[in-house]
Image (cartoon, rainbow, N blue to C red):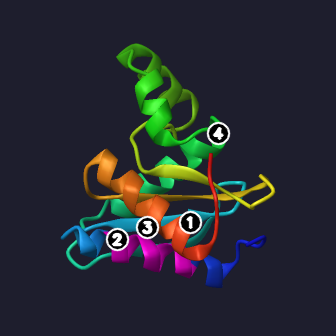
Amino acid sequence: MTDLNLDAAAKIAQGAFAAGAAAGVTTISVVVTDPGGHILLAMRGDGVGNFGVSVAHGKCKTALGFANSSMVLSKGFTDAGKVAALTAVTGGDFLPIGGGVRVKTSGGKVIGAAAVAGSSPENDESFILAGLGAAGFETD
C-alpha cells in the first residue's frame, strides 16, 4: 500500500486486535499516526485502562522521532538517566518500550507509525507487525 488513511489505519488495528485475540490477549490499545505523530486512529479493547492509548501514542512518537522501532530503541537506551533526560526533553513523548514501529510503503517511504500497548513488549511488537502485514504495509 502507498497511502496511510483512515481505512488503512483501521485495517492495521483490526489485524493487531486479531493477532492479540489469537494469543488470548484482548486488553490492548492500538494507535496509528501520520508521519508527524498526529493520531489518525486510536482504539482500545474492552477493559483497557486510561493510559493504553497514551502509551501506544508515545511508542509511535518514539519510533518516528528516533527513526527506529521502539523495541530496538528499548535495547539501546538502557541508562535510566539518559531515558529520563530524553523523556523530559521530548515533553514525555519518549517511550522506548517495544510495540511501536514506523509504517512504510513498499518503496521504503515513511508514511506514519503504529503501535500496540497493553501486553508484554514482545507481544505488543508482534501484534502491531501482524497488523501492518494484514494491511499490506512494511516497517524497518
The residue at which mark 1 appears reads as 32
| 120, 86: nearer the viewer | 120
Quadrant showing the N terminus? bottom right
- Mark 3–mark 1 distance (CA, rounded to whole Å): 7 Å
- Mark 3–mark 4 distance (CA, rounded to whole Å): 18 Å
Which mark lies nearer to you, 2 or 4?
Answer: 2
Residue displayed at 56% across by 66% down: 32
Of the image marks 3 and 4, the number of the one nearer the N terminus: 3
Q: Quadrant of residue 21?
A: bottom left
- Mark 1–mark 2 distance (CA, rounded to whole Å): 16 Å
Tag 3–tag 1 contact (CB < 8 Å): yes
The residue at which mark 4 appears reads as 65
Q: Secondary structure at mark 2?
A: helix
Q: Which mark is residue 19?
A: 2
Of the image marks 3 and 2, the number of the one nearer the N terminus: 2
Outermost residue toward the bottom in this view:
7
Q: Amino acid at mark 4?
A: Gly
Tag 3–tag 2 contact (CB < 8 Å): no
Q: Can you see residue 60? A: yes
Q: Determine if the magenta segment contains residue 100.
A: no
Of the image marks 2 and 4, the number of the one nearer the N terminus: 2
The residue at which mark 3 appears reads as 30
Residue 137 located left or right of residue 132: right
Quadrant showing the C terminus? top right
Which mark lies nearer to you, 1 or 2?
Answer: 2
Residue displayed at 58% across by 75% down: 135
Q: Which mark is residue 86?
A: none
Q: Amino acid at mark 3?
A: Val
Q: Secondary structure at mark 1?
A: strand
Residue 92 located left or right of residue 37: left
Numbered circles on residues, count: 4
